Image (cartoon, rainbow, N blue to C red):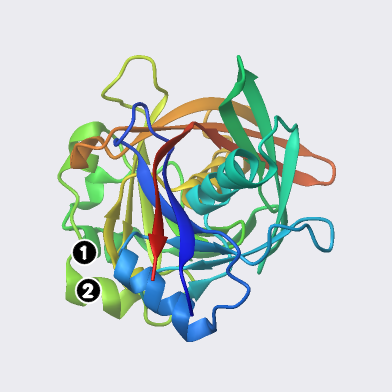
Amino acid sequence: MGEHTFSIVDVFAERKYAGNQLAVFEDAQDLSDSEMQRFAKEMNYSETTFILSGERGDGGYDVRIFTPEEEIPFAGHPTLGTAFVIQHEIMKKPVEQIILNLQVGQIPVTFDYRGGEPDMLRMKQKEPVFGEVFDRRDVVDILGLREDDIDDRFPVQTVSTGLPFMIVPMKNLASVKKSCIVQDKYFELIRDSEAKDILIFCPETYSRDNDLNVRVFAGYHGVPEDPATGSANGCLAGYLVKHRYLGEDRIDLRVEQGYEMGRPSLLFLNAEEKKSGIEVFVGGRVFMVARGKFV
């Protein structure tokens, strides 16, 4: 099997070691599915990605994404982190855009630079698909809350831009902070639901510079709480526009996540409703943390 080069990157971080870390393997075309799954399990990040070749094919770079438990069709911070590694370690020159070929389809990632280094990466996600609406009484049971913690002006609803999430609007930061997953009730509710993971949010924030506070629980995928989740926030962006959460058909927001975990992360959401549907962009910064060899 030999040695396999990988990078550790920090995605959506306000500062190094604060966001969501990711392992990215290069030239992984000779790895079997079971080997990729084993590598992801041993790395034990929420996701690990595998670039199948340093050469572009079918208009982009073929990439696969694994959690420690399974392969998934799409995830946000692996998409940005992998595009960063391709630019930084494979192409080794400034680029305006890199396209990743994922199971969910082609996802373009654009680069903004400060000096010679990327300052901001943004991905255009698939158009949001809106699904099941949940009874608030069921949701408060799995989050250990009361009904009056949830903002009843807006629905609790499944949204997907490639990976479905249950979006739950909360009234304030106090309600977000005290939320927790009641395991037996959580698994009972999601058993027959498309959305296995939960995003809760509120308009009150820890930092005055930010617009929304978010927490994401992904126990079904082996991640009790995620510090920064691009796929979930893309779903949130679509939700905010569809339900006119801010009273308009477009948003441009700074979203904080991971503060309750001591890993403050920052995501930039842009979305707009057009005749063709809701267009969603999720952006953030990426830092190189380390390079290594896996045997």
Q: Is residue 294 above or below residue 116?
A: below
Position of residue 118 in the picture relative to residue 19 (left or right):
right
Task: Give the spatial CA distance, label 2 vs label 1.
Answer: 7 Å
Q: Which mark is residue 185?
A: 2
Q: Nearer the viewer, mark 2 or mark 1?
A: 2
Callout 2: SS: helix
Looking at the image, which is closer to me, 73 or 1? 1
Callout 1: SS: helix
Circles 2, 1 touching at the beta carbon (< 8 Å): yes
Q: What's the residue at 56%, 41% (across, down)?
A: 237
Question: From where the camera sits, is residue 70 visible?
Answer: no
Q: Which residue is mark 1?
A: 141
Q: Amino acid at mark 1?
A: Asp
Q: Amino acid at mark 2?
A: Lys
Relative image position of residue 12 (x, y in whole percent)? 43, 36
Position of residue 192 in the picture relative to residue 87 (left or right):
left
Relative image position of residue 274 (x, y in whole percent)? 79, 38
